[in-house]
C-alpha cells in the first residue's frame, strides 16, 4: 500500500490545478480512470457548476450502501506556483529528496487527498462496515478562491444523513476539533474633496479612516477559547486619495476578523456598523462570512484517533471547507486532520514527508474501522 500511496501522491502533484483558473478536469479524470474505478466498486459523480464564465467540477465518489454517511473531504485546487525561479525543484516535478516530495500543493493538500484516497481504498475491505454506512470522498473545486465547490455541495443537500466529516488539511497529524470563523468587510469612509492648501475647507477621509482603526479592535468581545485562543483582527488593505495636493474624499479599509465560537457574531456585526467616523460618513459592506466551529472532543472517533496517532487536540486558526459543509441545521461532528506542516504551504519548495502520508492513512483507516465497527456491535 505504501508504494501505491507514494505513486498516487506523485501523480496528483504532477497534475497542475492552480487556482486561478481552478480547473479540475484532469485530476478528476485521473482519479476516475486510475484510482476510483467503477469496475472495482466505486461509484463516481462529477458535479459541474458555473463560477462566472467558467465551468468548475467537484468529484463525489462513494462506496457502501448504508443510510448514514461518513464524508472524507479535500480540495483539488492549489494556489499558484508563482515565480518558478524561486523554486529549487520545479513546482510540478514532484521531486523526491530525502523522503520528502516537493511541489506546489504537495502539502496543501495533495498529501491530504492521498490520505483520503488511501483510506477509501482501505475501507473497501470491510463489507460489514459498508453495509451500514456509505463512505463518500468529496474532491472539491475552488477552496482556495471562494469555496464555491463546497457551497454547491451544501446547497444540494450533500451533508444530509452524515455522521462524521473529515477535512484532510495539513495539521502535522494533530487533530483539529475547532476552527475560527471569518468576517471580511470593506469600510467606505466618505469625506469632502478640497485643495491641499486649504484643507480646513474639505473633510479628509484618510484621517477619518485612521480614527476608526482603534474602534475596530474594540468590536471584539474579550473572550477566549481553550484550543483557538482569542479572536483576531487584521487590517489588510487601505486605499484612498488621488494626489498629494487634494484632500481625499473617499477611503476604503478592508478588514479580516477571525473569531472564536464564544464571540457573539451579531454583536460583532452591530459594533462594526456602529463605529464613529465623524466628521466623515461611513458605509460598512460585509463581503464574506464563515461561522466559527467546534465539535465535541469526547466523541469516540476523536478519542480513538488520538490514541492511535498519539497527537494533540488543536484548534485551526484558518478557514476550511468545514465552515461551509457544517451547517446550523446539521451540525455534524467534524475533524480537521492530515499530514504535512502548515508552515510550508503557499511557499516555494512546498513539500511533504511521504512517511507522514503513509502513517496518517493507516491511523485514519484504523480509527474509522475501530469506531464504526464497535458502534455496530454496541
Image (cartoon, helix red, strand yellow):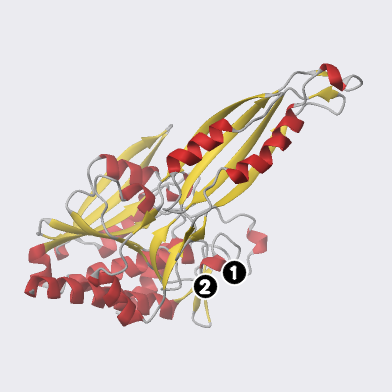
On the image, the x and y values in percent for residue 275 come to 60, 33
Asked if 119 appears above or below 225 in the picture, the reply is below
Q: Secondary structure at mark 2?
A: loop
On the image, the x and y values in percent for residue 368 come to 23, 72
Q: Secondary structure at mark 1?
A: loop
Q: Is residue 314 left or right of residue 342?
A: left
Q: Quadrant of the C terminus?
A: bottom left
Residue 125, by quadrant, is bottom left
Mark 1 touches mark 2? (CB < 8 Å): yes
**N-term-proximal mark, 1 vs 2:** 1
Residue 196, by quadrant, is top right
Q: Is residue 274 left or right of residue 15?
A: right
Tell me how many marks there are: 2
Q: Is residue 322 left or right of residue 155?
A: right
- Residue pictured at 21% horizontal, 53% vertical: 44
The residues tagged by marks 1 and 2 sit, at their Cα atoms, a distance apart of 7 Å
Circle 1 residue: 89
Amino acid at each position: 500500500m505504501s508504494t501505491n500511496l507514494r505513486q498516487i501522491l506523485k501523480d496528483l502533484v504532477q497534475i497542475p490545478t492552480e487556482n486561478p483558473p481552478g480547473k479540475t478536469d484532469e485530476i478528476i479524470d485521473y482519479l476516475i480512470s486510475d484510482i476510483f474505478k467503477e469496475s472495482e466498486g466505486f461509484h463516481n459523480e462529477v458535479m459541474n457548476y458555473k463560477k462566472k464564465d467558467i465551468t468548475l467540477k467537484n468529484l463525489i465518489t462513494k462506496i457502501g450502501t448504508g443510510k448514514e454517511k461518513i464524508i472524507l473531504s479535500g480540495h483539488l485546487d492549489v494556489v499558484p506556483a508563482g515565480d518558478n525561479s524561486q523554486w529549487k525543484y520545479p513546482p510540478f516535478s514532484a521531486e523526491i529528496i530525502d523522503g520528502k516530495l516537493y511541489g506546489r500543493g504537495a502539502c496543501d493538500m495533495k498529501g491530504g487527498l492521498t490520505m483520503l484516497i488511501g483510506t477509501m481504498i482501505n475501507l473497501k475491505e470491510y463489507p460489514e462496515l459498508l453495509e451500514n454506512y456509505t463512505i463518500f470522498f468529496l474532491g472539491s473545486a475552488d477552496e482556495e478562491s471562494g469555496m464555491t465547490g463546497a457551497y454547491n455541495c451544501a446547497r444540494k443537500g450533500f451533508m444530509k444523513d452524515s455522521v462524521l466529516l473529515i477535512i484532510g488539511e495539513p495539521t502535522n497529524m494533530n487533530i483539529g476539533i475547532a476552527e475560527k470563523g471569518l468576517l471580511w468587510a470593506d469600510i467606505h469612509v466618505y469625506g469632502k474633496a478640497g485643495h491641499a492648501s486649504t484643507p480646513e475647507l474639505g473633510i479628509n477621509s484618510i484621517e477619518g479612516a485612521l480614527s476608526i482603526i482603534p474602534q475596530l479592535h474594540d468590536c471584539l468581545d474579550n473572550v477566549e477559547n481553550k484550543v483557538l485562543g482569542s479572536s483576531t483582527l487584521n487590517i489588510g488593505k487601505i486605499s484612498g486619495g488621488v494626489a498629494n495636493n487634494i484632500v481625499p474624499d473617499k477611503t476604503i479599509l478592508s478588514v479580516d476578523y477571525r473569531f472564536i465560537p464564544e464571540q457573539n457574531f451579531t454583536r460583532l456585526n452591530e459594533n462594526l456598523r456602529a463605529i464613529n467616523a465623524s466628521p466623515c460618513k461611513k458605509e460598512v459592506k460585509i463581503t464574506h462570512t464563515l461561522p466559527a466551529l467546534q465539535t465535541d472532543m469526547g466523541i469516540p472517533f476523536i478519542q480513538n484517533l488520538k490514541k492511535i496517532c498519539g497527537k494533540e487536540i488543536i484548534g485551526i486558526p484558518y478557514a476550511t471547507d468545514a465552515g461551509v459543509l457544517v451547517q446550523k441545521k446539521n451540525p455534524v461532528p467534524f475533524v480537521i486532520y492530515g499530514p504535512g506542516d502548515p508552515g510550508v504551504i503557499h511557499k516555494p519548495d512546498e513539500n511533504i514527508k511521504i512517511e507522514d502520508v503513509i502513517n496518517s492513512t493507516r491511523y485514519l483507516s484504523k480509527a474509522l474501522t475501530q469506531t464504526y465497527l464497535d458502534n455496530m456491535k454496541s
